[in-house]
Image (spheres, rainbow, N blue to C red):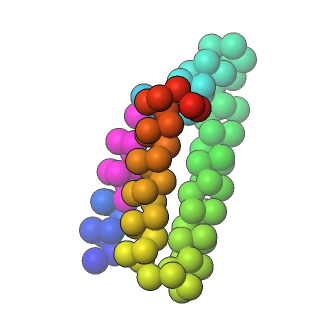
Amino acid sequence: MFWKTLLTTFGLVFLAELGDKTQLATMLLVSQNKSPKAVFFGAALALVCSTFLGVALGFLLNKIIPANYIQVAAGIAFIAIGCLLLFGKI
């Protein structure tokens, strides 16, 4: 079960991060600063910290709110943001 969850999480996050604005920003930083090690470690640390916050908040929220409510709220939020982007409000 652990390995299945680990591999599923890796695959989902890896695919979601490919070609997004974070990856483009890291490429831009490397091209400007010529320090790939510093950019790599800075971006990796940022992703680890961001992921830690997501896991910690998800864990705490799950103790207060049932998971299906969180999923529905996240779905509604994504739809709302999509609509706002579609109509140029963001």
At x 65%, y 55%, the residue is 49
Residue 69 image-quadrant placement: bottom left
Q: Is residue 19 above or below residue 82?
A: above
Which is more toward the observer, 27 or 88? Answer: 88
**Main secondary structure found in the magenta portion:** helix
Q: Is residue 69 above or below residue 34?
A: below
Indicate left or right for 80 with 64 as reference. Answer: left
Provide residue 16's location: percent of width, then percent of height: 39, 42
Q: Is residue 73 above or below residue 86?
A: below
Provide residue 34's location: percent of width, then percent of height: 68, 16
Where are the magenta residues, as a range? 9-18
Which is more toward the observer, 58 or 24? Answer: 58
- The quadrant the N terminus occupies is bottom left
- The quadrant the C terminus occupies is top right
Can residue 23 be spotted in the picture? Answer: no
Residue 4 image-quadrant placement: bottom left
At x 43%, y 30%, the residue is 86
Q: Is residue 47 above or below residue 59?
A: above
Q: Is residue 77 magenta?
A: no
| Count of marks overlaid on the render | 0
Can residue 75 be spotted in the picture? Answer: yes
